[in-house]
Amino acid sequence: MLDCLILLDIYPAREKPIPGVTSEIIYKNVTAEKVMCSKENALSVLKEHLNEVVLTLGAGDIDQLVEPVKNFLLQKSQS
């Protein structure tokens, strides 16, 4: 069961944008707790909604969040 979905904007990585395809399509159909945010705010939102399991999925430059998320989780587990 999903406790909280932190959803970022959908943007094209190497392809052209598909008109009408946005994060809002997913957001409005999810019934769990949910938050929509920018990539720049994702780590601070994660800190507010931390659960036992964190799953990240994405494309493009979203990998820039891997180290900050990992470091936060390691720090949180040591406190």
Image (cartoon, rainbow, N blue to C red):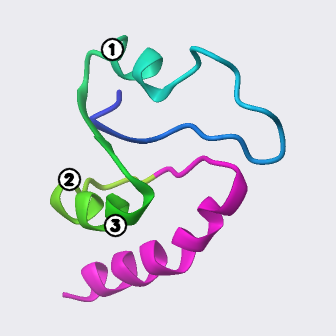
- Secondary element at image label 1: loop
Name the dominant secondary structure of the magenta segment.
Answer: helix
Above or below, 28 relative to 39: above
> Who's the residue at 29% across and 79% down the image?
77
The C terminus: image quadrant: bottom left
Local crowd size for mark 2, using a 10 Å CA cut-off: few (<14), some (14–19), many (≥20): some
Could you tell me which residue is drawn at 61 percent across and 41 percent down? 11
For mark 1, what is the residue? 28
Q: Earlier in the sequence, mark 2 or mark 3?
A: 3
Tell whether 71 sits left or right of 33: right
Mark 3 highlights which residue?
43
Label annotation for residue 55: none
In the figure, 79 relative to 29: above or below? below
- SS for dot 3: helix
Badge nearest the viewer, 2 or 3:
3
Residue 7: quadrant of the picture: top left
Q: Name which quarter of the figure residue 64 lies in.
A: bottom right
Q: Which residue is mark 2?
A: 49
Give the residue type that dot 1 points to.
Answer: Lys
Q: Position of residue 23 (x, y in %)?
A: 47, 28
First in sequence: mark 2 vs mark 1:
1
- Extent of the magenta region: 55-79
Q: Nearer the viewer, residue 26 or 71?
A: 26
Residue 53: within the magenta? no
Front of the two marks 2 and 1: 1
Amino acid beneath label 3? Leu
Percent x, y of residue 44: 25, 66
Magenta region includes residue 67: yes
Residue 25 screen position, x and y as percent? 45, 15
* Amino acid type assigned to the residue bearing label 2 in the image: His
Instruction: Describe residue 70's horizontal placement relative to residue 11 as left or right.
Output: left
Q: Which residue sits at x=56%, y=37%? A: 10
